[in-house]
Image (tube, rainbow, N blue to C red):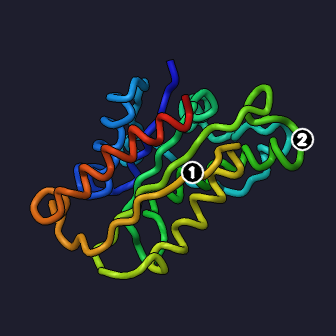
């Protein structure tokens, strides 16, 4: 069975980005996928300290919960990342998680080792939420970060949901519930791409 990992990057539980992620994961599950959700704020992730330890064998030397995260993402057929915007980028918690994939960069570009066996590409999707209303330009910085993360982990960026104008925590439920349906539908479509 194909597996999709959802990564909830918000520092707050059950906010707009996580609710959108949950809806998208329900869509994946309804389409026949196996899902797992990683909540960044609930795991112990230290920042990359730029020690260069991963240059030796492509393995991060920091002993924390990331050591359990790497194999999960390598084995995933699909990855959905969700984050609210902070100063035009992803949350600090999610950025810390992403920065720890420097070990994948070392493996891929310094050691010329594959991230996934057989050169198989995973599929990736991004959900971003913003309090302020605006155009897609509002999300450019965050999209670039996610695309870089997907690239280094051999994951093809296949789409995104960019929701703005969500000022209050429960805006997706109280004022824009149609966006949750949009996320659910996107989950079913996303799974059809990775089947």
Residue at point 62%, 59% (across, down): 147
User: Which residue lies most toward the top here?
Assistant: 1
* x 44%, y 41%: residue: 189
Q: Is residue 74 above or below residue 135?
A: above
User: Is residue 23 or residue 182 the one in the foreground?
Assistant: 182
Quarter of the view holding residue 70: top right
Q: Is residue 195 above or below residue 140?
A: above
Residue 48: image quadrant is bottom right
Q: Residue at x 33, y 37 (%)?
A: 27
Residue 49: where, in percent of width, then height?
A: 66, 56
Give the labeled residue for mark 2: 112
Between 188 and 9, the one lying in front of the other is 188
Q: Secondary structure at mark 1?
A: strand
Q: CA distance from mark 1 to mark 2?
A: 25 Å
Q: Is 105 displayed left or right of 14 in the figure? A: right
Residue 39: give its label: none
10 Å crowding of disc 1: few (<14), some (14-19), many (20+): some
Circle 2 crowding by C-alpha within 10 Å: few under 14, some 14–19, many from 20: few
- The answer to whether residue 64 of the structure is visible from this angle is no
**Looking at the picture, how far across and down is residue 91, in whole percent?**
43, 63
- According to the picture, the residue beneath numbered tag 1 turns out to be 158
- Residue drawn at the location 39% of the way across and 41% of the way down: 187
Q: Looking at the picture, how far across and down is residue 24, in whole percent?
A: 35, 43
- Tell me if 4 is positioned left or right of 171 in this view: right
């Amino acid at each position: 069975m194909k597996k999709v990992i959802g990564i909830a990057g918000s520092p707050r539980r059950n906010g707009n980005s996580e609710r959108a992620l949950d809806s998208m994961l329900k869509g994946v599950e309804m389409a026949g996928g196996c899902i797992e959700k990683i909540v960044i704020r609930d795991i112990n992730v230290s920042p990359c300290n730029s020690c260069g330890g991963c240059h030796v064998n492509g393995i991060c030397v920091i002993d924390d919960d990331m050591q359990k995260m790497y194999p999960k993402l390598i084995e995933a057929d699909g990855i959905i990342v969700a984050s609210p915007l902070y100063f035009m980028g992803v949350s600090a918690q999610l950025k810390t998680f992403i920065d720890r994939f420097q070990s994948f960069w070392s493996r891929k570009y310094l050691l010329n080792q594959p991230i996934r066996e057989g050169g198989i590409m995973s599929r990736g999707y991004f959900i971003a939420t913003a309090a302020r209303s605006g155009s897609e330009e509002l999300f450019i910085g965050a999209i670039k970060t996610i695309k870089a993360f997907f690239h280094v982990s051999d994951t093809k960026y296949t789409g995104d949901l960019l929701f703005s104008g969500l000022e209050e925590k429960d805006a997706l439920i109280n004022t824009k519930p149609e966006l949750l349906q949009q996320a659910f539908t996107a989950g079913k479509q996303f799974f059809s791409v990775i089947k």
